Amino acid sequence: MTTLRRSAPAKINLTLRVGGRRPDGFHEIESLVALVDLADSVEVTDHEDGCYSLECDEPTLPRDGSNLVLRAARALAQSAEINRGAEITLTKRIPAGAGLGGGSSDAAATLMLLNDLWGTRRSPAELEQLGATLGSDVPLFFHGPLSVVRGRGEHVARGPGALRAWVGLVLPAIACPTPAVYAEFDRLPAPPARPTLDEVRAALDAPDRLMGLLFNDLEAAAARAVPELGRLMERVATEVGGPVRLTGSGSAFYRLFAQRAATEQWAEDVRRKLGIRGVVAQTLA
């Protein structure tokens, strides 16, 4: 049996501008997104009888048809009109529900792997379109390390330049439900004026200066929806050293650095002073 494997990287939202609610219920967004080397691993093996199985080292993730990886496999088989199955093994390093896009990245990796394994010959654009039917973040992971995302997430373009930075990630064990965050966003006043993409692009080569330009329109809403998260972000910024930025609708947040040593020290201080999981990652080149 043939087995294929690939990494499924996490993402961080460097900027996240949120507009009004669309007729389809989603919000219009514009986001500059970077991929980082914190990654899951997805492995697929052909299963001739059309059955699907999923093994995962994270016991809290569902193994039934609600899992995005299994939905991706079935969607590709249905679109290609084939009766093929797969044994899928998922090794998780990206925490679920943290705003890091782990599930969406896993789904995109599954589509790419099974496209090769089954020989379905779907182009990257066709796989991306299929991924958009599974979730708003899935199309992002068919693109490069720095992208601009618009619409509800389905419109992805190459980012303005390149970012090479170290990332101190804080991964609190806090649930931050996306619907609740957006509901709070709708109740808040409109966000203030934000830096433009051109202004952000001009600082991509200076991570310390770049941090002062980054923003996330959902931060205030997330702090209202989950006050514990807001308090934690304030504590990290004051007791460890800020500023920090939320990724997605949370609950993970981060700070950028130019040097690995400074990042490692910051993450260690997060663990030591606050007893929270802090990890070191790097943006993908």
Image (cartoon, helix red, strand yellow):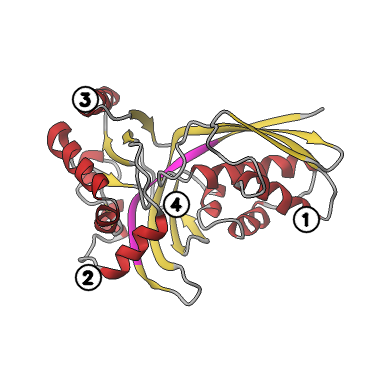
Return the residue at label 3.
269
Per the picture, the main secondary structure of the magenta-coloured stretch is strand
The mark closer to the camera, 3 or 4, is 3
Q: Label 3 is placed on what type of residue? A: Asp
| In the image, residue 55 above or below residue 229 | above
Q: Earlier in the sequence, mark 1 or mark 4?
A: 1
Dot 1: few (<14), some (14–19), or many (≥20) neighbours within 10 Å?
few
Q: Earlier in the sequence, mark 1 or mark 2?
A: 1
Disc 1 versus disc 2: distance between alpha carbons? 44 Å
Choose top left, top right, bottom left or bottom right for residue 36: top left
Give the residue drawn at x 28%, y 59%.
221
Q: Is residue 155 left or right of residue 1?
A: left
Give the residue drawn at x 51%, y 73%.
24
Q: Label 2 is placed on what type of residue? A: Pro
- Mark 1 near mark 3, Cβ–Cβ under 8 Å? no
Q: Is residue 209 left or right of residue 129?
A: left
Give residue 196's position: percent from left, percent from top: 28, 61
Give the label on residue 78, or none. Answer: 1
Residue 95, magenta (yes or no): no
Return the residue at label 2.
189
| In the image, residue 102 above or below residue 200 | above
Give the residue drawn at x 55%, y 56%.
135
Q: Secondary structure at mark 4?
A: strand
Q: Is residue 185 left or right of residue 86?
A: left
The residue closer to the viewer here, 45 or 214, is: 45
Q: Earlier in the sequence, mark 1 or mark 3?
A: 1
Q: Secondary structure at mark 3?
A: helix
- Mark 1 near mark 2, Cβ–Cβ under 8 Å? no
Residues in magenta, as a range = 8-18
